[in-house]
Amino acid sequence: MSEKSKQIEGRTGPWEIVLGLEVHAQVASNAKLFSGAAVGAGASPNSQVSLVDAAMPGMLPVINRHCVEQAVKTGLGLKAQINLKSHFDRKNYFYPDLPQGYQISQFKHPIVGEGEVIVEHDDGSTFTVRIERLHLEQDAGKSLHDQDPNATYVDLNRAGTALMEIVSMPDMRTSEEAAAYVKKLRTILVYLGTCDGDMEKGNLRADVNVSVCRPGDYEKFRETGSFSHLGTRCEIKNVNSYRYIQQAIEYEARRQIEILEDGGKIDQETRLFDPTKGETRSMRSKEEAHDYRYFPDPDLLPLELDPAWVKRIEATLPELPDAKKGRFQSQYGLSAYDAQVLISERARADYYEAAAKGRDAKLTANWVTNDLAARLTAGGIEIEASPIFPDAIAELVQLIEENVISSKIAKDVFERMWNGEGRASEIVEKQGLKQVSDTGELEAIIDKLIAENPGQAEQVKEKPQAIGWFVGQVMKATGGKANPGVINQLLKSKLGAD
Ligand code: ADP
Ligand code: MG
């Protein structure tokens, strides 16, 4: 990315944005972090609450081994340091949906330390976001304000659910980069199976920290590591879509620039994004910020991991997106772009590999990423639920490869496949769509065309491109079924355009 495109022109000169994200990812787990209560959306209110989650007196938390394993797996997937010893702390604050009066979190000693994520720009170039830490913590319950005009109800189903908070360094410089980072992080988590990545349900959401500075300041921060070179940040809480992340950043950066250009200063505060107005507004300032009085939770032992256990988890890691992308390029000869599109969803990559077996890899990639993807998107269907199976796409590709049908006819066959009319070869047979490569049949059509259009034929001698008109006419006469290679060859020899 060019230096210029990072800059925002203000009245007093150019500015740059600096962004650091805290992503909350719900751990994929059947049970909560410290209780055996079930996890999952859709259950009736307060039906998934154990005595521990309701904070009944005398209840003791017991750590869920699976959640720890998921955090370790995620740490390994982020190429991060796994801390063999970590602690749980109490983060104290009062809120109606927090019955304990504190959240169990990890403050000083998180389970995962520094790592990194390599992120793709739209144009295929990459940048690196450093991960500062990942820690485990409990989610809170939910206040329901829309059930009664005079009362607020509380649903504790979510209380105690395991979250991974993944904290990045302030390494993103544009709203696109922030969205691309969350997208990549989500892909990695879904590959690992440690979070379902469902942003609509709030299972993956981001706190976005935004500050602005003058050109050159960020470079000084990177050279020295000192945050004093950066502007004061504001934190926008709980943004749960790529679009909102971008809108919130754009708005917030402009707001800060205006304040600074008017001679004001930025208050470090927590803000909320209002998607209907497209604005951020203040939630609480640093002065009113909580004093959480963190201290180690006396009900929980320090978490100590056996290095051999960590090694065993490492051995179960699936092929991750970056590795898969490299392999798709070398094994299938795909462009970086095609490989990226295919690996961005694990299910799409699996579909592709199943379809491409023994087939033209590039052609198969085109069908999966263009026609099929367009149909699936339009229907709001996940590729796992595609009505056309990988082997059916392979069959279609084979018919094109073997010149049984033209690419143009293949589009029609594909539409019929989508509409459930059968497999590609059946459709071709039933509809009589086989490509006409029979030179005799095509020659007769061409001879007739030349005889009837002597003027056009003359033109081709001077302007070889004029041959296109004839190709079009032959296609028309054969209902699009003529083999374009054969027509071109015949036309060239008959019209002397070689
Ligand atoms: P807090 O608990 O106050 O939210 P954290 O250390 O948990 O602090 O997270 C701070 C987040 O803010 C990190 O993602 C970090 O990269 C980011 N951040 C820190 N300073 C800046 C800054 N000047 N501009 C933008 N983001 C920043
Ligand atoms: Mg934080």
Image (spheres, rainbow, N blue to C red):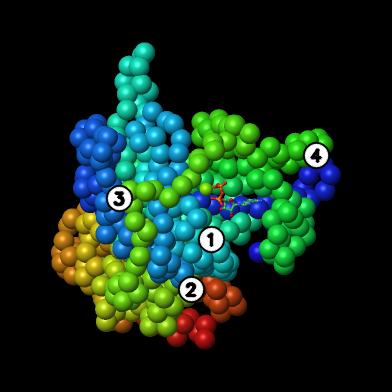
Label 2 to label 1: alpha-carbon separation? 29 Å
Picture coordinates of residue 282, whole percent (x, y):
60, 31
Q: Earlier in the sequence, mark 2 or mark 1?
A: 1
Task: Give the class, few, some or many, for how many residues have Cα within 10 Å of label 1's Cα (few <14, many ≥20).
Answer: some
Looking at the rendered structure, the kind of residue marked 3 is: Leu
Element at label 3 = loop
Q: Earlier in the sequence, mark 3 or mark 2?
A: 3
Question: Comparing marks 4 and 3, which lies closer to the viewer?
Answer: 3
Left of 20 or right of it: where is 494? left
Looking at the rendered structure, the kind of residue marked 4 is: Glu
Looking at the rendered structure, the kind of residue marked 2 is: Ala
The answer to whether residue 173 of the structure is visible from this angle is yes
**Mark 1 close to ligand 1, CB under 8 Å:** yes
In the rendered structure, are the residues bearing label 2 and label 1 in contact, judged by CB atoms less than 8 Å apart?
no
Number of the label disc, if any, that sits on residue 33? 3
Residue matched to label 2 = 336
Left of 284 or right of it: where is 315? left
Looking at the rendered structure, the kind of residue marked 1 is: Glu
Quadrant of the image occupied by residue 464: bottom right
Q: Earlier in the sequence, mark 1 or mark 4?
A: 1
Number of the label disc, if any, that sits on residue 261? 4
Picture coordinates of residue 293, whole percent (x, y):
50, 41
Left of 330 or right of it: where is 255? right
The foreground one among 122 and 40 is: 40
The residue at the point 58 percent across, 66 percent down is: 127
Label 4 to label 3: alpha-carbon separation? 47 Å
**Mark 2 close to ligand 1, CB under 8 Å:** no
Task: Give the class, few, some or many, for how many residues have Cα within 10 Å of label 4's Cα (few <14, many ≥20).
Answer: few
Element at label 4 = helix
Label 4 to label 2: alpha-carbon separation? 42 Å
The vertical placement of 259 against 189, above or below, is above
Position of the N terminus, as image quadrant, is bottom right
